[in-house]
């Protein structure tokens, strides 16, 4: 057994850090300088959901599933984002929706029984490592075309009674479940690399039925209101738009907090168990907070990979070659899109 060491799992913060498509650029200024005042004092102004950060329930909902008013950051337990952790190696393709099958598979490869009745993940922090952290940059590839979670993954976390989920992706939901697609009051339906909206690109690649999973009106059109209610009705009952960030709301509405944009040297702890430390600001009525995330682990248990380097600020794509290597590794055809929606809807309609 070696000595215990800390591993940084946080992207560096700076004025040029990549940020979600409509977030403001951080403003960093000096109030005092060494030459003029003999001290350096700096001012920072930015959205708290920038870079590696935590989400609190109030960020996405008004009411939690138990009927209480959704909690702010200061109302969460001090250790809500901290505890025994596992870093699951999620094997998925570019733009793929992460399901319970992906999560079960990652558990088995770590020697964890995925049966929730066994309780092996109960009370733990679950880190999802997909490789997206290596592409952290101001690009469509990182934001538009990321893989991501949805309702099914959210319910998987609830069933396993985990305490926190940290992801190396742009959000706790697949891009098309967010305002980048056709969801939310601020929905943007952003243009993709082809010049067409990313919603249309997805339909062209995988079909309208596969896309319907991400869009309330498309879902009802293709599969009917009854199927929609069975899939997203629990969210709608507490006043939430079902296809708008369903993983966020399913998790947070059950008190499972989340961390987005996990990064740094997370490859060193991939497939490992460790202590995860993450503390948001003690912010009264906060909806989330930037945070420093670290792993505490036996150095003999670390993966033998190079230490992460960043070219500048928060950007993490060091070369076109890095981008292409990741893209072509992940750019494989999705499993039958019909399984993703059609079969699941049939099961819901038939009461399975």
Image (cartoon, rainbow, N blue to C red):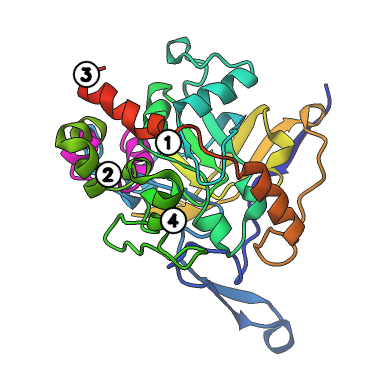
Q: CA distance from mark 1 to mark 3?
A: 21 Å
Q: Which residues are magenta?
A: 232-255
**SS type, badge 2:** loop
Residue 152 colored in magenta in the image: no
Q: Earlier in the sequence, mark 1 or mark 3?
A: 1
The image shows residue 162, relative to residue 214, as above or below, that is above
Q: CA distance from mark 2 to mark 3?
A: 30 Å
For residue 183, the mark is: none
The image shows residue 346, relative to residue 309, as above or below, that is above
Q: CA distance from mark 4 to mark 2?
A: 35 Å
Pointer 1: what residue? 337
Residue 236 colored in magenta in the image: yes
**SS type, badge 3:** loop
Q: Nearer the viewer, residue 189 or 66?
A: 189
- Pointer 1 and pointer 3: residues touching (CB < 8 Å)? no
Q: Nearer the viewer, residue 180 or 224?
A: 224
Quadrant in which the N terminus appears: top right
Pointer 2: what residue? 70
For residue 201, the mark is: 4
| Residue at horizontal 78 percent and vertical 33 percent from the top | 303
- Pointer 3 and pointer 4: residues touching (CB < 8 Å)? no
Pointer 3: what residue? 351
Q: CA distance from mark 1 to mark 2?
A: 34 Å
Q: Nearer the viewer, mark 4 or mark 2?
A: 4
Q: Nearer the viewer, mark 1 or mark 2?
A: 1
* Quarter location, residue 111: top right
Residue 268 seen by the camera: yes
* Quarter location, residue 251: top left
- Dot 1: within a 10 Å radius of its alpha carbon, few (fewer than 14), some, or many (20 or more) residues? some
- Pointer 4 and pointer 2: residues touching (CB < 8 Å)? no
Counting from the top left corner in percent of width and height, residue 291 is at 55, 51
Q: Nearer the viewer, mark 2 or mark 3?
A: 3
């Amino acid at each position: 057994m070696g000595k215990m060491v800390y591993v940084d799992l946080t992207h560096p913060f700076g004025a040029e850090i990549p940020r979600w498509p409509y977030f403001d650029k951080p403003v960093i200024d000096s109030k005092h300088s060494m030459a003029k005042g003999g001290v350096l004092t700096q001012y920072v102004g930015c959205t708290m959901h920038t870079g590696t950060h935590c989400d609190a329930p109030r960020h996405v909902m008004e009411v939690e599933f138990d009927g209480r008013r959704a909690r702010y950051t200061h109302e969460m337990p001090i250790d809500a984002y901290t505890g025994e952790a596992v870093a699951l190696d999620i094997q998925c393709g570019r733009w793929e929706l992460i399901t319970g099958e992906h999560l079960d598979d990652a558990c088995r490869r770590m020697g964890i029984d995925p049966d929730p009745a066994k309780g092996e993940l109960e009370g733990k922090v679950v880190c999802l490592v997909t490789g997206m952290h290596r592409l952290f940059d101001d690009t469509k590839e990182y934001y538009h075309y990321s893989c991501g979670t949805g309702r099914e993954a959210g319910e998987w976390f609830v069933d396993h009674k985990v305490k926190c989920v940290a992801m190396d992706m742009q959000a706790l939901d697949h891009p098309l479940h967010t305002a980048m697609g056709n969801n939310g009051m601020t929905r943007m339906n952003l243009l993709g690399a082809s010049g067409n909206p990313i919603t249309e690109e997805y339909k062209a690649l995988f079909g309208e039925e596969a896309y319907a999973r991400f869009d309330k009106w498309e879902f009802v059109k293709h599969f009917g209101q009854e199927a929609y209610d069975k899939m997203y009705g629990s969210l709608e009952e507490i006043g939430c738009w079902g296809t708008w960030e369903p993983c966020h709301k399913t998790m947070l509405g059950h008190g499972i907090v989340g961390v987005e944009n996990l990064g740094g040297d997370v490859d060193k702890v991939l497939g490992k168990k460790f202590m995860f430390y993450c503390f948001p600001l003690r912010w009264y009525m906060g909806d989330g907070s930037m945070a420093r995330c670290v792993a505490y682990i036996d150095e003999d248990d670390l993966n033998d990979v190079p230490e992460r380097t960043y070219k500048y600020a928060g950007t993490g794509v060091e070369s076109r070659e890095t981008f292409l290597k990741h893209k072509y590794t992940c750019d494989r055809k999705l499993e039958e899109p019909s399984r993703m929606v059609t079969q699941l809807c049939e099961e819901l309609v038939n009461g399975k």
